[in-house]
Image (cartoon, grey):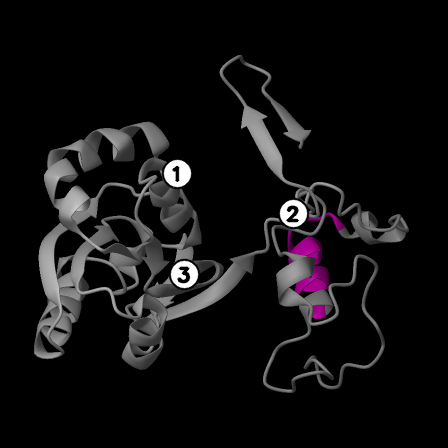
Amino acid sequence: MIISENKDIKETLEMIGKSEKLILVGCNQCAAACNSGGETEIDDLGENLKRLDKKVLKHLVLDPACNLLKTKKDMKSIEKEIEEADAVLSLACGDGTQTLSKIIKNKPVYPVNNTLFIGEVQRVGKYEEACRACGKCELGWTGGICPMTACAKGLINGACGGSQNAKCEVNENNDCAWVKIYERLESIGQLDNLREVRGPKDFSKKNNRIRLDNRNQRGTAKNV
């Protein structure tokens, strides 16, 4: 899931400037799960804005915000309020905020959230980065442990030799990713995976915008 957190209210106020009539839009998926964009967070932000003499015309929680066609349909229900508003505040991730910007042509859409990473929920309020969306997944030969996120150096051929007592030399609070990969591969009988020297990481998909059409069975991703 996409992990996000609310910006400081001071930063939000500086961003919206003189805008007084506002619409708040959240997301009932990732942002709600992170306590950064659900009903509670929208209500709290609305109360703060009202105390600062801002007027909240309407609030809406999308499900999800990043679905362009569904969001376009849902936003039609508040077309009149959008026309009256000075700005729309998005409590979704960066993707959801961009989706709203594509739909709302004549009003600014401001992000209330900072989008942090793609990660997993360890427990309520605690998250860990799990995926960097690198465009070429390596998990198939590393035992399901990502070397891009788990290794501070992002090594494809590890370990680096700098770890001590199975801890990372960059951050001694972190386990060495390649020790974990070794132990995992050993446990599933795939240690031979480490005998192959891997070529340089191909970041071509990561460094270029991608559009994916998977309406047919095979699906294709294209750089644009």
Furthest-top residue in view? Answer: 216
- Quick one: label 3, few (<14), some, or many (20+) residues within 10 Å? many
| Of residues 54 and 10, the one drawn nearer to the viewer in this rendering | 54
Hey, which quadrant is residue 182 in on the image? Answer: bottom right
Distance of mark 2 from mark 3, alpha carbons? 21 Å
Question: Where does the image place residue 99, in percent across and percent down from the top left?
Answer: 38, 41
Q: Tell me the residue that label 1 is attached to.
A: 102
Question: Where does the image place residue 96, in percent across and percent down from the top left?
Answer: 37, 47
Amino acid on which disc 1 is placed: Lys
Span of residues in magenta: 179-190
Local secondary structure at mark 1: helix
Question: Where does the image place residue 158, in percent across and percent down from the top left?
Answer: 81, 64
Mark 2 or mark 3: name the one nearer the start of the chain. 3
Mark 3 or mark 1: name the one nearer the start of the chain. 3
| Of residues 23 and 220, the one drawn nearer to the viewer in this rendering | 23
- Quick one: label 1, few (<14), some, or many (20+) residues within 10 Å? few
Q: Tell me the residue that label 3 is attached to.
A: 3
